[in-house]
Amino acid sequence: MSAQELRPVAITGTGSYLPEKVLTNADLQRMVDTSDEWIVERTGIKERRIAADDEATSDLAIAAGREALTNAAVKAEDLDLIIVATVTPDMAFRATACFVQKTLVAQKATYFDVSAACSGFLYGMELARQFIATGSAEKALVIGADKLSAIIDCTDRNSCVLFGDGAGAAVLQPAGEGTGEILSAYSGSNGNLDEILNVPGGGSRQPLTAENIGDKSNTMKMAGREVYRHAVTTMMSAAKEAIARAGLTPDDIACFIPHQANLRIIETIAGKLHVPMERFFVNLESYGNTSAAAVAIALDEAQRTGRIKSGDHILMVVFGGGLTWASSVVRW
Ligand code: ACO
């Protein structure tokens, strides 16, 4: 199909879900050798949400997905496609999207999961956009959902203070009268840097045994400083690329919605792009880094709180383990 035949695609509804339980910096102070002052100064995070023991990633995903469907006025039974981006699936197999399809009763929908860590939501959004642009689907539900508390070593102060649980979702449909449009998308990956952020155990390379569970090889390992350095450079270049592909400049972007990992990363990017922080949407102080959910939750909150209005250009830019990165400009 030639580029001329591709249909423009819009986000027609968003939703999000955060678990009830709040874990504050003061709570963490009682668990590991850290302080509220250190966490706030180095990351900007004040508290995060933690899923209940009986709440799986799909439960978070379903709640966010339901809200997005309601806001888009789309019935689950009319969905053609469900994509769940997650690195904390309910089970090694089947796909977390399977639980979403079953519970929402979206029997017509093809479903699958995407594994791209914190970049997963934008990877999923681009896949859904292409399904719709080529006419393979009419209505898609894309969800970023992670229960990182399930794979965090809560005795490791280097990582346990950074992360939280949550889910965000968007419904995508062909653009039409009164809708916005996804104007550009860009993504990249670097498999050579897989060692600086990963969960080594629990897969086929290192199936869990009594010994390696003791070594906590089923929890996240992160070289924080290295990740920080790559996050700044790749998010910067990804932001510029999506803006250029949309034929715009940073001045044209009303709201920047970056991955919510660390306030210092966001402030550095804002400074390098010469964009005031007021144009960046930040909610990491309340939720920490929720991985694939972070940018989707931020998009939903920015929309609900009036930070983005019809006709605004918004930029989403993400970065995550793999390493992976992605960006997209949307006219709202
Ligand atoms: N409380 C108190 N001290 C701590 C803590 C803590 N929670 N964590 C580390 N420290 C100590 C370190 O041990 C170190 O002590 P030392 O100097 O005696 O060795 C000191 O603080 C400084 O450590 P650094 O790692 O240099 O601190 P930095 O300023 O780099 O901040 C941080 C660490 C917050 C992890 C930062 O590097 C960062 O945000 N990196 C990016 C992490 C990230 O975004 N990961 C996820 C991205 S992808 C995804 O989302 C899955």
Image: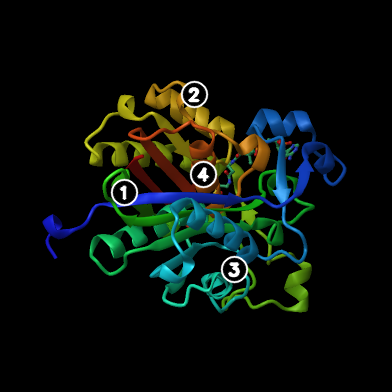
Amino acid at dot 4: Asp
In the image, is residue 307 above or below residue 187? above
Q: Earlier in the sequence, mark 2 or mark 4?
A: 2
Instruction: Kindly report the distance in space between the C-alpha atoms of the residues bearing marks 2 and 4.
Output: 19 Å
Which residue, given by chain and number where applicable, does mark 1 sit on?
185
- At 41% across and 33% down in the image, what residue appears? 309
User: Sequence order check: which comes first, mark 1 or mark 2?
Assistant: 1
Coloured how? Answer: rainbow
Pointer 2: what residue? Answer: 277
Which residue matches tag 3? 89
Residue 264 pos. (x, y %): 56, 30
Name the residue at 76% across, 45% down.
22
Q: Amino acid at mark 3?
A: Pro
Q: Earlier in the sequence, mark 2 or mark 3?
A: 3
Residue linked to disc 4: 300
N-term mark: 3 or 4? 3
Comparing 246 with 80, the one in front is 80
User: Is residue 4 something that shows in the picture?
Assistant: yes
Q: Do labels 2 and 3 touch, CB within 8 Å? A: no
Crowd tier of the residue under label 3, counting other residues whose Cα lies within 10 Å: few below 14, some 14–19, many 20 or above: many
